[in-house]
Each structure stands twice: as C-alpha cells, then as structure tokens.
Amino acid sequence: MTADASEALHAYRSLSGKQKEEQEKKLNNLLSKRKELLVQAMRNDTNVALLGFLPESLIQQASQAQVGDDCVEHEATVEGTLEVLHVDYDNGTSETAYYLDDANNKRLELHPRQDVSFQSGQHTPLVVAVFSYKG
C-alpha cells in the first residue's frame, strides 16, 4: 500500500482542476486506509510495520501538497513521563504497554522497535514516528 500511496501522490502533483480534486479524494482515502493498516501492524510487530513507512521525500511531498492530514507519519521529538504497564497472564503469556504523557496530559501509545529499558515515571525526550501529535 505504501507503493500505491507513492504513485497516487506523484499523479496528484501533475494534475489540475477537477481531476486534481478527484485524485485528492482518492489519495486521502488511500492514506487513511494505509494508516489503519500501519497502526494495526505497529501493534502486532513493530519491526515489520517500520518497513511500510514512507520515505522522507514522500512525507515532505505530502506535507507540501497538504494531503493526507493526520494520515502520513512524521518524525517528532516528544517529551513527557513514561508509563510502563506489564501484565502476566495465568496462561504463561505476558504483555507490556508503553505510554508517554506530555505536559498537556496528552497520552501517546508507544510501540518500541525492540525490547527497551523504560521505567514508569521516567521523564525523557523521545524521537518517535507519529501520525498526529500536537504537543
């Protein structure tokens, strides 16, 4: 789907008028579906999901074209207090969730690339990939 988004963005840039408006709707729909799939992949296997990220050049093009509002990932530095929740289940499995709460009480769910040594209460800046973050 990332390749489809790339092709659609290139096509969008070369159009004008009514054709451009129609292509913008298609592009926004495609980017929205891509976002849903990418978020699901982040929850299942972060390392695999990272393979589907758009190249920086396309992220900049989408931003310049003002398409894909909140549907195109970008890099941001966020700072806040970490919360790590770990649950051990009776069946022997476990789950760990990572969150960052910023100064405005906005909570980001984090999906680290690999095992990390975060501790609850840790206050730290992090460089992350986000779809929408207004600190």
Image: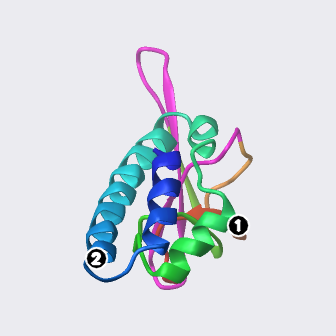
Task: Check if mark 1's residue and mark 2's residue have beta carbons within 8 Å.
Answer: no
- CA neighbours of label 1 inside 10 A, class few (<14), some (14 to 19), many (20+): few
Residue at (42, 14) in percent of width and height: 91
Residue 67 seen from this side = yes
Location of residue 94 in the rendering, given as x and y in whole percent from the top left corner: 50, 27
Q: Name the residue under label 1.
A: 127
Helix, strand or loop at label 1? It is strand
Residue 21: mark = 2
Q: Residues within 10 Å of mark 2 (few under 14, many from 20)?
A: few
Residue placed at 67% from the left, 44% from the top? 113
The dot on residue 66 is: none
Rendered position, 12 above or below 52: below
Residue 17 vs 91, above or below: the answer is: below
User: What's under tag 1, amino acid-wise?
Assistant: Val
Residues in magenta, as a range? 87-115
Near-viewer residue (68 or 115): 68
Q: Which residue is drawn at 41% across and 42% down?
A: 40
